[in-house]
Image (spheres, rainbow, N blue to C red):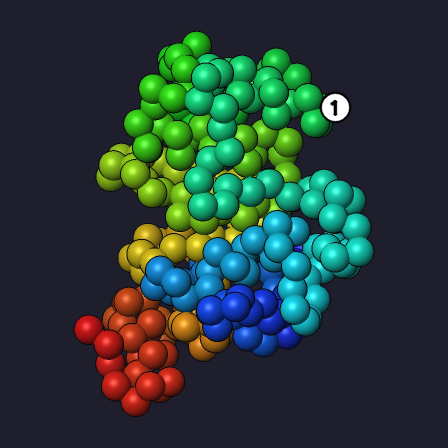
Amino acid sequence: MEKVLEVEQLTKLYKNGRGVRNINFSIERGDVVGLLGPNGSGKTTIMKTIMGLCHADSGHVTIFESDVEEDVEKTLSKVGGLIERPAIFEYLSARDNLKMMARYYPGVDAARIDHVMEVVRISRYQKEKAGRFSLGMKQRLGLALAILSEPELVVLDEPTNGLDIEGTVEIREIIKKMAEEKGTSFLIASHLAPELEKTCNKVAVVHEGDLLSFETMGDALKLNPSLEDYFLSMVKDKRGTVLI
């Protein structure tokens, strides 16, 4: 399988001592990889480094065999992302936000904008100002922005944040359909083990800045009834006690 993303010995530490150390994992075409860990575990730091939003202290991030540090613009041309919160202009309508983003991608036309709005189910609200959207609606718009250019790798930080049950299921199905039908690869960070279990085919467990494991979902669940139990077993192995 074609390797889309490779993270090698990635270390990024902040002045307060938090960050990540010696992170190693890779994503192949069509993979949906879950980055599982509690708040503050280092998930967002990993994603920001992958997206060129912060510089690593050491290690490498390569996307389609190109180093992010050496040429951010070229390397990220095939990548879409939603990190921390949607990068939207609240005084613009949903459609105008997408039109603004489309200016950076020559191949994106009005038909593509219509399509992504339909995919994330915001077409009926396209003329409404984004500032009036609920948190869940902003997440939908953020996902539309992330997939607008038809990227081959999509990086999503808590993509179902603020969504109700139906919305969560819809986003999950969008991700799985894109992976299966178009070979789009996803890296999805979340602290919700049950959701990643239903969405991903591989999982990386991050805890206090360390990568505790990286396995297929099938292997993770072989000896554990759920991904939540698997996560707790990894933490137990690290600390000698289960955190509850």
Residue 63 sits in quarter: bottom right
Q: Residue furthest left?
A: 244
Q: Residue at x 68, y 71 (%)?
A: 58
Residue 25 visible in the snapshot: no
Secondary element at image label 1:
loop
Q: Nearer the viewer, residue 94 or 55?
A: 55
Q: Position of residue 167 (x, y in %)?
A: 31, 34
Q: Amino acid at mark 1?
A: Pro
> The C terminus is located in which quarter?
bottom left
Residue 140 visible in the snapshot: yes
> The N terminus is located in which quarter?
bottom right
Q: Residue at x 39, y 12 (%)?
A: 128
Above or below for 19 versus 126: below
Q: Position of residue 34 (x, y in %)?
A: 45, 58
Q: Which residue is mark 1?
A: 106
Residue 6 sits in quarter: bottom right
Q: Does 182 sit left or right of 200 as displayed?
A: right
